[in-house]
Image (spheres, rainbow, N blue to C red):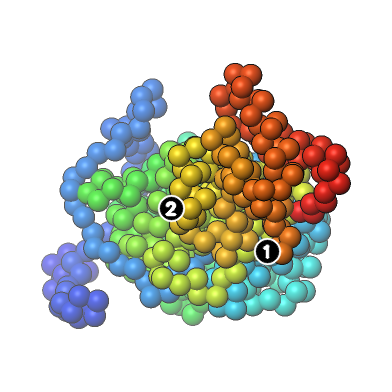
């Protein structure tokens, strides 16, 4: 069919989101180039990457339903010591509880290569949870596919690297060879009734209209043929994505999602974003993907992942709540339980200032801030952290804290019940205050650490016969 005949036969349809008639006049065949397109104008390796603009913008297109998926046991395991089978199952239980009855944590993906990982898959599947769905991840290899068949997975992810950096320089293939290879493995999965999730690795350095859109269009043909969903995961492997309106693809997150959704015909519920944090944009890019037509955002707990890490799962829980005005059944107190489990049972130390989970994320240290916090915690606390995270706001002790500030710290840190709380007039508070004053009289200018306070409180309890239980 020639271009003229193609365009003349395109149907005119109503877009029910904007109530306008539209005609799609786009045809994007594979551009099987002889040399790789490295986008050197944007990615000169000996300079900092550039963010060019052409001021072409696409409309917001938030799907009705958006959700979170998890890669803690896959990408999250690529940058730390492997979890034990028991740890994986415990974390999976937590994810189920966090996601709530509506399955807001939709799926969790697993490696299949080691016996430990396969044992974890079996045990998690035995739980019988609808969500998170247990899924796997394999390379685009027929040998890897045998593992998927043996275990009886209903869905598997397949690595289908899409930038010329990977196709030419790593796989040593042409674009057409790579596409045909990927499609053959996808077809093998579909033949066995296994749904596929295609991981388009390095999409923010890929030729979006010369390779990604034509490839996704072919995937949609297979989905229609086999009547099985094919998830397209857009992987910002190097963290190059930006959310700025009018930025040029392939760095534009809105542009990528629009191209996959509108021009490749992939429905929103089959699009997923997977971000990395190399340029501190993992969370904002993931939220942007939601805003422009992507239903799923892939995350890992506490952002643990390759290099600078993935989009933190806990961050997207609160992004969802801010966008939708509801938690849709998610139990956010589980986030604190998970943080405590990681530190106490796994031995992972979460940086103190990590939002939502760090030891000091809601601790006020500045003296003038502490004064306001003691009068009304809303002044310096982001939301009711005790309600949503079981983490009451803390006020660090310094030379400006006074008796009330010390009493507040003790009551909050030890989470004393109302009837057990101490007042600023207690002997223990006076004991601690005397020590604090001495510290600053000797020339100290920094706030006191938790360990220092706990030691002097313990000494005071011993001397005064007081018992505090955290």
What secondary structure is marked by label 1? Answer: helix
Q: Residue at x 26, y 45 (%)?
A: 248
Side of 342 where 23 appears, left or right: left
Q: Are dots 1 and 2 in contact, CB under 8 Å?
A: no
According to the picture, the residue beneath numbered tag 1 turns out to be: 418
- Residue 48 in picture, x, y percent from top left: 36, 28
Is residue 257 visible to the viewer in this orientation of the structure? yes
Q: Residue at x 47, y 55 (%)?
A: 376
Please rate how many residues cluster around mark 2, counting C-alpha atoms within 10 Å: few if below 14, some from 14 to 19, many from 20: some
Side of 318 where 440 appears, left or right: right
Q: Residue at x 39, y 27 (%)?
A: 45
- Residue 256 in picture, x, y percent from top left: 34, 55
Q: Residue at x 49, y 37 (%)?
A: 366
Side of 113 where 204 appears, left or right: left
What secondary structure is marked by label 2? Answer: helix
Which of pointers 1 and 2 indicates the residue nearer the eye? Answer: 1
Q: Quadrant of the N terminus?
A: bottom left
- Residue 37 in picture, x, y percent from top left: 34, 39
Residue 146: which quarter of the image? bottom right
Task: Indicate which disc residue 379 carries.
Answer: 2
Above or below: residue 70 compared with residue 438 = below
Sequence order check: which comes first, mark 1 or mark 2?
Answer: 2
Viewer-closest of 217 and 421: 421
Viewer-closest of 356 and 277: 356
- Residue 372 in picture, x, y percent from top left: 46, 48
Viewer-closest of 148 and 421: 421
Side of 324 where 114 appears, left or right: right
Viewer-closest of 427 and 197: 427
């Amino acid at each position: 069919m020639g271009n003229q005949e193609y365009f003349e036969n395109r149907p005119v349809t109503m877009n029910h989101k904007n109530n306008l008639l539209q005609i799609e006049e786009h045809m994007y065949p594979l551009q099987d180039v002889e040399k790789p397109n490295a986008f050197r104008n944007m990615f000169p390796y000996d300079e900092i990457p550039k963010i060019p603009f052409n001021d072409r913008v696409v409309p917001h297109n938030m799907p009705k339903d958006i959700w979170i998926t998890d890669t803690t046991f896959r990408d999250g395991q690529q940058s730390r010591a492997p979890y034990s089978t028991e740890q994986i199952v415990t974390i999976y239980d937590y994810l189920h509880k966090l996601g709530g009855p509506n399955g807001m944590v939709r799926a969790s993906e697993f490696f299949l290569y080691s016996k430990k990982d396969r044992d974890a898959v079996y045990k998690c599947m035995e739980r019988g949870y609808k969500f998170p769905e247990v899924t796997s991840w394999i390379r685009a290899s027929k040998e890897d596919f045998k593992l998927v068949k043996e275990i009886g997975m209903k869905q598997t992810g397949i690595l289908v690297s899409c930038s010329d950096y990977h196709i030419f320089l790593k796989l040593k293939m042409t674009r057409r060879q790579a596409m045909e290879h990927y499609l053959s493995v996808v077809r093998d999965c579909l033949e066995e009734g296994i749904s596929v999730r295609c991981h388009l690795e390095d999409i923010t350095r890929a030729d979006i209209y010369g390779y990604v859109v034509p490839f996704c269009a072919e995937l949609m043909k297979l989905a229609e043929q086999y009547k099985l969903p094919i998830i397209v995961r857009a992987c910002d492997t190097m963290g190059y994505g930006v959310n700025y309106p009018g930025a040029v693809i392939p760095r534009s997150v809105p542009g990528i999602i629009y191209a996959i959704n509108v021009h490749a015909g992939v429905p929103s519920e089959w699009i997923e974003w997977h971000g990395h944090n190399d340029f501190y944009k993992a969370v904002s890019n993931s939220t942007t993907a939601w805003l422009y037509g992507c239903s799923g955002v892939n995350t890992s707990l506490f952002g643990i992942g390759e290099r600078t890490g993935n989009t933190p799962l806990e961050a997207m829980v609160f992004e969802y709540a801010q966008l939708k005005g509801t938690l849709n059944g998610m139990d956010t107190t589980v986030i604190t339980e998970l943080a405590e489990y990681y530190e106490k049972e796994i031995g992972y130390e979460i940086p103190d200032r990590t939002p939502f989970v760090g030891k000091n994320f809601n601790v006020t240290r500045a003296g003038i801030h502490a004064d306001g916090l003691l009068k009304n915690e809303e002044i310096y606390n982001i939301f009711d952290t005790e309600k949503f995270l079981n983490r009451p706001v803390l006020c660090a002790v310094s030379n400006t804290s006074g008796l009330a500030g010390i009493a507040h710290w003790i009551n909050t840190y030890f989470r004393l019940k109302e009837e057990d709380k101490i007042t600023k007039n207690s002997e223990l508070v006076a004991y601690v205050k005397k020590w604090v004053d001495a510290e600053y009289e000797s020339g100290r200018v920094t706030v006191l650490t938790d360990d220092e306070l706990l030691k002097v409180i313990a000494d005071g309890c011993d001397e005064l016969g007081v018992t505090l239980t955290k």
